[in-house]
Amino acid sequence: MNNDMNSDLELFTRLAKEVLSQEKENPVTKNLSPNNLLNKLDIQLEKNGIDEKQLASKLKEILIATPKTSSRLFFNQLFGGRHSKAVLGDLLSIILNNTMATYKVAGPQAAIEKEIINKVASIIEYESDFGGTFPTGGSMSNFMSLIMARDKKEPKIRKEGVNTKLTLYTSENAHYSISKNTAFSGIGKENIRYIKSNLKGEMSVGDLKNQIQKDILQGFTPFYINATSGTTVLGAFDSIDKIAEVSKKYNIWLHVDGSYSGTAIFSKKYKELLKGVSLSDSFCFNAHKTLGTPLSCSVLVVKNKKYLYNSFNNDASYLYQTHHDLDDFNLGKTSFECGRKNNALKFWVLWKSIGTRGISKIVEKGYDLSNFAQSYIEKNKDYKVYSHPNTLSVCFNYKNYDPVDLCTKLYETNTLMVGYGSFKKNTFVRLVVVNTNNNIRVLRQFFSILEKFAKNNSAKLKKVTCLKNKKTY
Ligand SMILES: *Cc1c(COP(=O)(O)O)cnc(C)c1O
């Protein structure tokens, strides 16, 4: 067994090409139950190693058996598809293997990360004091914003722990990381106020205001509002500008969780969806969800970088040894992690190669495709629609088929990868349209596969007797 980079790069190219051709020929991987996995694939680790040829063939078997998240028929998650330039950047970052903590070790890579932060801050019109970082994902971006808000409101907490009755506000449709993060932060899940949303899934600003006033009267200290730009199920956008009036009035940190659809800021046509984002204290988006950038690539920008330093800087003489006069380039002082993977380069290579106009085109293509799918189901009386225009999550039920059973059987028969979601007591199929390598023809194919499958398996599929629908079939 060699440890030889050149021959392994060749092996990589061969295996990667195999994955790409499989993706075209068999866009849905044959599913394997965890019970059969160990019989079919050689996953077990042994005392002795194996030779090069065996390794190559075993790797190939495992790759072929792995679900294909970049194929045209993958609609199951909020990411999917890949841009080759972003993949190129990620592969290079692996070969370089820097940590982003210090300028001494990251060199120009630190400037690459800063350049993305600078450009994003300028797009959302944050003024000169802004800062930012690349956390491990949207959940971590949200966590960091929560901690900054907490430490700003109650500076003693960093030393003494949480002794104040702090409360935070988010819509009932927020991502589950808000709940987990609140537990991690020591604030406690009981102090999250879930604000009701309207029928489109947008947080009710009137309810938000009432709840804050009520909490203040009862001796709580409101410190954080999370507005979501692209809720995880419906892809709804909270009204940031109206929420910002409330956050300003009560001096509460406003975070915009754009993990899913915050990339709309790049499009002239769709940036209205985030109207008021310049009034927020922090904002994040995931390039790995809608921009074809490999997992993970989350960008967090903060209106005033002093809060990043305040919560995340810690002295460490074993780490920070140079460039004290240019501390801005020692990125570890504003990040959560110590050793931190370079997640900026892949997004930078993409952005550099296609320009801001190219990024904008990717975003707009996503909305064009999802608007096509949305209008397809709106026009067809066999479908009941739950989503609204300008969402990347197209939510529907088909005839009276139970969406949970339908999605599960589509998966079990290796037909389509699509999932379901729920909103206000309704459950529905959630078609996620984020793979912009796709086109309208593929979406038509999606619907025709689904319709044919339902027809051919009608006897086996569960029906819902009473879908809580306004439209009748
Ligand atoms: C996906 C998502 C997150 C979490 O992002 P990860 O990178 O998966 O941690 C947070 N908020 C929203 C609205 C999301 O859709």
Image: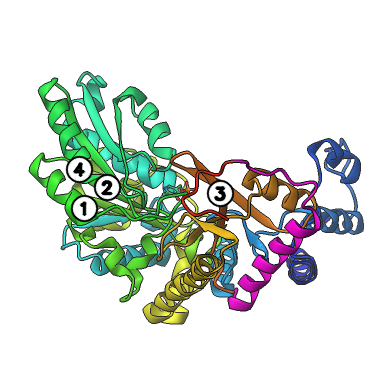
Label 3 or label 4, whichever comes before in sequence order: 4
Asked which secondary structure carries label 2, the reply is strand
Q: Is mark 2 within 8 Å of ligand 1?
A: no
Q: Mark number for residue 428?
A: 3
Q: Which residue is mark 1?
A: 280
Mark 1 crowdedness (10 Å alpha carbons): few <14, some 14-19, many ≥20: many
- The spot of residue 381 in percent (x, y) is 56, 64
- The residue type indicated by label 3 comes to Phe
Real-space Cα distance between discs 2 and 3?
29 Å
Q: Is residue 50 visible to the viewer in this orientation of the structure?
A: yes
Label number found at residue 255: 2
**Magenta residue check for 467:** no
Dot 2 or dot 1: first in sequence order is 2
State the mark number for residue 253: 4
Residue 293: x %, y % from top left: 52, 64
The amino acid on which the numbered mark 4 sits, given as a three-letter code, is Trp
Q: CA distance from mark 2 to mark 1?
A: 6 Å
Instruction: Indicate left or right for 250 with 293 as reference.
Output: left
Q: Name the N-terminal-most of marks 1 and 4.
A: 4
Q: Position of residue 345 (x, y in %)?
A: 47, 65
**Which circle, 2 or 3, is nearer the viewer?**
3
